[in-house]
Image: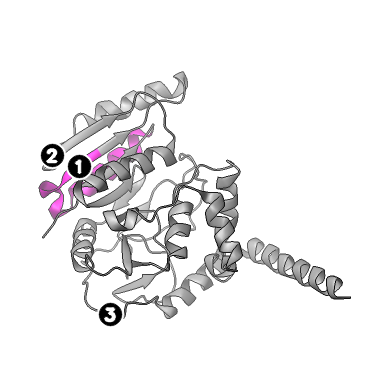
Amino acid sequence: MFLAPITIFAYNRPWHIQKTIEALKKNQLAKKSKLFIFSDGPKDEKDRKKVEEVRQYLREITGFKKITIIERRKNLGLANSIIAGVTEIVNKYGGIIVLEDDLITSSYFLKFMNEGLNFYEKEKKVVCIHGYVYPVKAKMPETFLLKDPGCWGWATWKRGWKLFDYDGRKLLMELNKRNLTPEFDYNNSYPFTNMLEDQIEARVESWAIRWYASLFLKNKLTLYPGRSLVFHSGDDGSGTNSRVSDQFKVKLSAQSINIKDMPIKENAVVLREYIRYFRSIQPSFILRAGKKVLKSLNRLLNHKK
């Protein structure tokens, strides 16, 4: 079985990266896997000490087949760091597993990622594997497919990453042109379009929203586990784009996920559950979306008078 290289992106959070590495080492495949860690350079002198703390820890890591640390001299920023790093590694190895420094994984994470990459290697419709599952109330199927690649612990092939489009403005224009923003926003239940607009206007630094839009517009699918294999520890306000919240808190799966054949289409049942979950945590967005629709209807009616 092909074992994809693991690529982790770190910055200035020593505690978080340590927890990420400790959890990853508990995976059986860790000792057989190559690990690449991209350490972004400090933004300013205030961050320099924390960045150096992170790097001192990284130099002491063991437990993987081979460890390569790339220490950036300059600060690229989260989005540029990930885009550049993923491009470099996936082009060289053909496949990649990606983590950030605030993701804690189940001991079955690497198994699922690698088995998913091997199982769907020749299925052109499937272009990504994702490890995080939102804390919905309903029981999920063992595995399922969605038109959303996610960003909290994922894997892809070179053929998948080639679909990534850097141009957020172009992506938004295409979504609007094809009237796809309601679907892109999970039936107006979560403000993903707003996030893309914020990226375009440089209000947030996000590669992930462009990754989602790129694959969504190509009608591509992502494989998910029925139980979350990733816990996001960055909702403590320490991350670049994070805030303090427990909305995305999940319990890591203590069991392996079995991958088997299933229809190559988006799971409608899971999609409804995700929409229900998003609506439970985003009531204000739903209200705004409703008002936006009413405004559009009013403009249309006034235009016809």
In the rendering, which numbered label is found on residue 62? Answer: none
* 188 lies left or right of 26: right
* Amino acid carrying mark 1 in the image: Leu
Q: Mark 3 points at which residue?
A: 262
What secondary structure prevails in the magenta region?
helix
Residue 157 is at least partly visible in this image: no
- Dot 1 or dot 3: first in sequence order is 1
Query: Answer yes or no: do the residues labelled 1 and 2 have beta carbons within 8 Å?
Result: yes
Quarter of the picture holding the N terminus: bottom left
Residue shown at the point (57%, 56%) measured from the top left: 172
- The answer for how far apart the CA atoms under marks 3 and 2 are is 35 Å
* 276 lies left or right of 34: right
* Amino acid carrying mark 3 in the image: Met
> What segment is highlighted magenta in the picture?
13-36
Q: What element carries label 1?
A: strand
Residue shown at the point (56%, 68%) measured from the top left: 180
155, 61: nearer the viewer: 155
- The answer for how far apart the CA atoms under marks 1 and 2 are is 6 Å
Q: Name the residue under label 2.
A: 66
Quarter of the picture holding the C terminus: bottom right
87, 118: nearer the viewer: 87
29, 76: nearer the viewer: 76
Q: Mark 1 points at which residue?
A: 35
Q: What element carries label 3?
A: loop
Mark 3 packing: few (<14 Cα in 10 Å), some, or many (20+)? few
Residue 273 within the magenta-colored segment of the rendering? no
Q: Is residue 124 above or below residue 7?
A: below
